[in-house]
Amino acid sequence: MFGSRALLSIMLVAWQGLDSSAQSPEARMQFLLDSLYRSDTTCVGIIAHVEAPGLSWSGAAGKASKDGAYLDPDAPFLIASNIKTYVSATILRLVEEGQLTLDQPVGPLLTERTRTLFAGDGYDLGAITLTHLLSHTSGIDSYTGYGYIDSVAADPKRRWTRDEQLARTVRVGSKLAEPGTHFSYTDANYLLLTEVIEDRTGMPFTAAMRELLRYDAMGYTHTWMPTLEPAPPNTLPLVHQYWDTKDWDSYDLDVSVDLYGGGGIACTASDLARFNRDLLTGKVVADPAVLQQIYTEVQTQDSVPSDYLLGLMRMPVGHLMAFGHGGFWRTEALYLPALDAALSIAVLEREHRELKNQVVRGIVGIVAE
């Protein structure tokens, strides 16, 4: 396997050998993906999309599964925690419509069952606000710790419900801190936010997100929540996504392990990149004052560092600042304001973090030229 500098040097030499007709950004980005895939085929496959002024490109290298066909750049994948940006945007749309404010307590917005559950574990739902949930500063513990992975491995086809996962949060965890004093990333915050969405809209959160974020009007025609919504017409089969350390194939797991707001969306790289660019350029949440709130940073009272905002993270790429999110299955979406460019990536074997970073750095370098 090549080191990062050695691989970059090899690619630079190879690029210089290409004839001028192949020097387009699209050709260079495809060459990057092909080179990185060949350097370590255990990544299974790589998909990327770039959306920028004068450039809308999807590329792929590798296979859609370990023993399957070559990977199509239009193949959809599970975006896992990248959904958090969508949930945040949905909450902001409800703020834009005057149905919510970010500083209001969450207690009255939750089901009676959930209020009783969390109040009984010492949580003050009159003090926890939407901002606290969105920024992971609520003090709520995580259901995904305390042996959750082992539970999933023992019964991979179990159908989980949101209520079960929230109940697990209380049963195995405990209150971490008072609201606003401590950062701790936990999917439970976003499961609660989907309850808020349902309370305000009177419809399933999946339908509410589709309507409020205007999937159809915005052209997100290959975005859905598997098992909660039908796959859109003319959508390719989901790719296989792997965690080799645990011998996991996403096809062997019930998607409900990560479905109710902490994860859950499947889409193409194109839909993912375009959504993030549309959102952060004011095409999804149109009111600039409301959209600006997505960049809120809660200053906690401890030493736990965080670049987390509201369903969004600061993500430096070289000398440029990006805003975006990552997901469990080694997915990432980011938007770089200085370039007005959005990038989405999926590496199909999740242990390949550094390879994903090489894709980001390489593509951003090409777009920035």
Image (tube, rainbow, N blue to C red):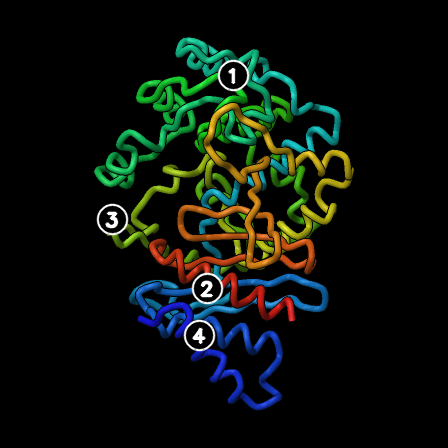
SS of the residue at dot 1?
loop
**What's under tag 2, amino acid-wise?**
Gln
- Residue at the spot of label 2: 358
Q: Is residue 18 left or right of residue 148?
A: right
- Residue at the spot of label 1: 111
Query: Could you give the CA–CA distance between mark 3 and mark 1, rounded to whole angstroms?
Result: 35 Å
Which of the image's four quarters has the N terminus?
Answer: bottom left
**What's under tag 1, amino acid-wise?**
Thr
Query: Could you give the CA–CA distance between mark 3 and mark 4, rounded to whole angstroms?
Result: 27 Å
Nearest to the eye among marks 2 and 3: give it. Answer: 2
Query: Could you give the CA–CA distance between mark 2 and mark 3, rounded to whole angstroms?
Result: 24 Å
- Residue at the spot of label 4: 34
Q: Residue at 54% x, 38% y: name it.
A: 308
**What's under tag 4, amino acid-wise?**
Asp
**What's under tag 3, amino acid-wise?**
Lys
SS of the residue at dot 4?
helix
Above or below: residue 115 compared with residue 196:
above
Q: Out of 114 and 149, give the one closest to the viewer.
A: 149
Q: Out of 10 and 291, give the one closest to the viewer.
A: 10
Which of the image's four quarters has the C terminus?
Answer: bottom right
Q: Which quadrant holds residue 221?
A: bottom right
Nearest to the eye among marks 2 and 1: give it. Answer: 2
**Residues at circles 2 and 3 in contact by the CB criterion of under 8 Å:** no
Q: Is residue 297 left or right of residue 80?
A: right
Nearest to the eye among marks 4 and 1: give it. Answer: 4
**Residues at circles 2 and 4 in contact by the CB criterion of under 8 Å:** no
Percent coordinates x, y for residue 292 in the rendering: 71, 37
Above or below: residue 204 compared with residue 288:
above
Percent coordinates x, y for residue 224 in the rendering: 53, 46
